[in-house]
Image: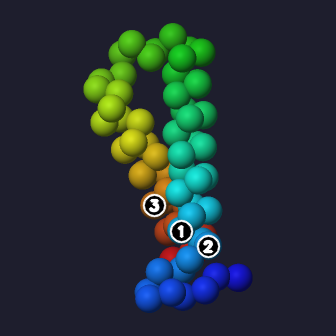
Amino acid sequence: MDVNVLGSFFPVWMICAVLGVAFAVVVRLLLVRAGLQDTVGPRALIYPSLAMFFTFGIWLTFFA
C-alpha cells in the first residue's frame, strides 16, 4: 500500500531506489568476477547510472 504525499508515492519510491542500488551492486560483482571491471568506463558515472536505470525500470514495470 502506498500513500500519495504531495504527488510522491512515499514507500514505493524508496523500495525502488533500494532495489536499483542492489541490482547495480550485483552487476558490479558480476563484472568483477568476470574480470571486466577494468574495461568499464568512468566508474563514478557508470554505476550510479546503472542504479538509476534499474530504479526507473522497476518503477515503470511495477508501479506506473
Q: Nearer the viewer, residue 44 or 50?
A: 44
Q: Position of residue 4 (x, y in %)?
A: 54, 88
- The vertical placement of 10 against 46, above or below, is below
Q: Residues within 10 Å of mark 3 (few under 14, many from 20)?
A: some
Q: Residue furthest front?
A: 5
Identify the residue at image location x=47%, y=80%. 8
Identify the residue at image location x=70%, y=82%. 1
Element class at badge 3: helix
> Mark 3 — residue?
56
Q: Residues within 10 Å of mark 2 (few under 14, many from 20)?
A: few
Q: Amino acid at mark 1?
A: Trp
Please identify the quarter of the rendering in which residue 29 is found: top right
How many labels were placed on the picture? 3
1 vs 3, front mark = 1
- The reply to whether discs 2 and 1 touch (Cβ–Cβ < 8 Å) is yes
Structural distance between the alpha carbons of marks 2 and 3: 15 Å
Which mark sits nearer the N-terminus, 1 or 3?
1
